[in-house]
Image: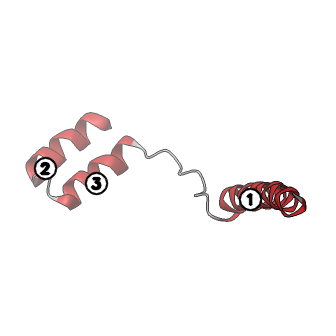
Amino acid sequence: MHEFQFFGGGWMMFLWLFLLIAITAIIVKFLFFSKPPQPKSSPLEILKRKYAKGEIDKEEFEDRKKDLK
């Protein structure tokens, strides 16, 4: 019976250790691995990116660029 009680206490200690490690991991993740907020792109920057990726051709780029000004 004495061994059974130790086994139960061991599980409680394991539970607290697990919770401590989980909380520490969550805090570390948010403090060190979160991305800084990205600044919002202007419409012209978005247009330039689309042109650079080849999603639009030069004529469409120039037309849309005129519309933005």
Q: Quadrant of residue 6?
A: bottom right
Name the foreground residue: 32 vs 19.
19
Which residue position is annotated with label 3? Answer: 48
Q: Position of residue 38 (x, y in %)?
A: 53, 51
Which residue position is annotated with label 1? Answer: 18
Q: Position of residue 20 (x, y in %)?
A: 80, 58
Describe the element under mark 2 as helix, strand or loop.
loop
Neighbourhood count class around disc 2 (C-alpha, 10 Å): few under 14, some 14–19, many 20 upward: some
Q: Distance between the residues labelled 2 and 3?
A: 9 Å
Q: Position of residue 19 (x, y in %)?
A: 76, 54
Mark closer to the chain start, 3 or 1: 1
Neighbourhood count class around disc 1 (C-alpha, 10 Å): few under 14, some 14–19, many 20 upward: few
Q: In which quarter of the image is residue 31?
A: bottom right
Name the foreground residue: 30 vs 55.
30
- Which amino acid type corresponds to the residue marked 3 in the rendered image? Lys
Which residue position is annotated with label 2? Answer: 56
Residue lying farthest top? 67
- Which amino acid type corresponds to the residue marked 2 in the rendered image? Ile
